[in-house]
Image (cartoon, helix red, strand yellow):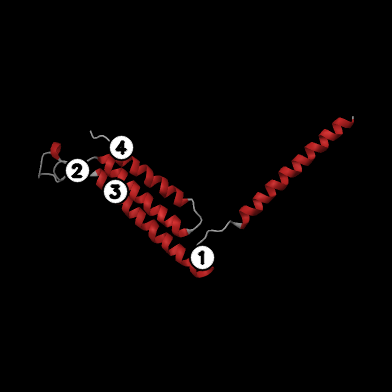
Amino acid sequence: MSSVNLTMAIVLGGLYATGFYLLLQRSLMRVLLGIVILGHGANLLLQQAGGAPAGRPPMLGEAPVQSMSDPLPQAMALTAIVITFALTTFLLALAYRAWQLLGHDEVQDDVEDRRIRRLESELSEGEAAENEQELDSEATR
C-alpha cells in the first residue's frame, strides 16, 4: 500500500486544471495543448495509483507470483499514451485544415445554435408579453 505524495497531488491538480482550462478555449492549438497536458496528467495519475515499481518483471517461470510487480498501471499508461497521441494527430490535422480554409484556428459559433438561441429569446419575450396582457386584462375587470 502506497500513500499519495502531497506534492504529486498538487502537481496532478495543476495539470488537470490547466488542461481543462485550455480545453475550453476557442483556439484549436490551445485545445491541443490542453489534450496533451491532460494526457500527461493521466499518465502521472496512473503511475501514482500503481505505486512504485517494486518486484520482479511479471514473467511466468522467472520469479514467484508473489514477488512480481503489477503490470496493469504500465499497460494503462501505455494505452493513455496511444489515445493522447491519436487525439493530438487528429487535432493537428484539424487545426491545419482550419488554417488552410479560414486563415485561423478559432472555432466559431454554429449558425444553428445562434438561430435556436434567438428563437428561445423571442419565445420568452412573447410569453412575457402574453403574461403582461393577461395581467392587464385581469386588472381592468
| Percent position of residue 96, x then y | 45, 66
Return the residue found at the far right. Answer: 141
Q: Along the polypeptide, which appears first: circle 1 or circle 4?
A: 4
Q: Along the polypeptide, which appears first: circle 1 or circle 3?
A: 3
**Which residue does the image show at 28% across and 39% down from the upper left?**
49
Residue designated by label 2: 53
**Disc number lying in front (2 or 4):** 4
Which kind of residue does numbered mark 2 sit on?
Answer: Pro
As drawn, is 113 to the left or to the right of 40? right
Residue designated by label 3: 77
Residue designated by label 4: 6
Q: Along the polypeptide, which appears first: circle 2 or circle 4?
A: 4
Judging from the image, what secondary structure is the residue with disc 1 in?
Answer: loop
User: In this figure, what is the number of numbered marks?
Assistant: 4
Q: Residues within 10 Å of mark 4 (few under 14, many from 20)?
A: few
| Percent position of residue 19, x then y | 41, 49
Label of residue 104 in the image: 1
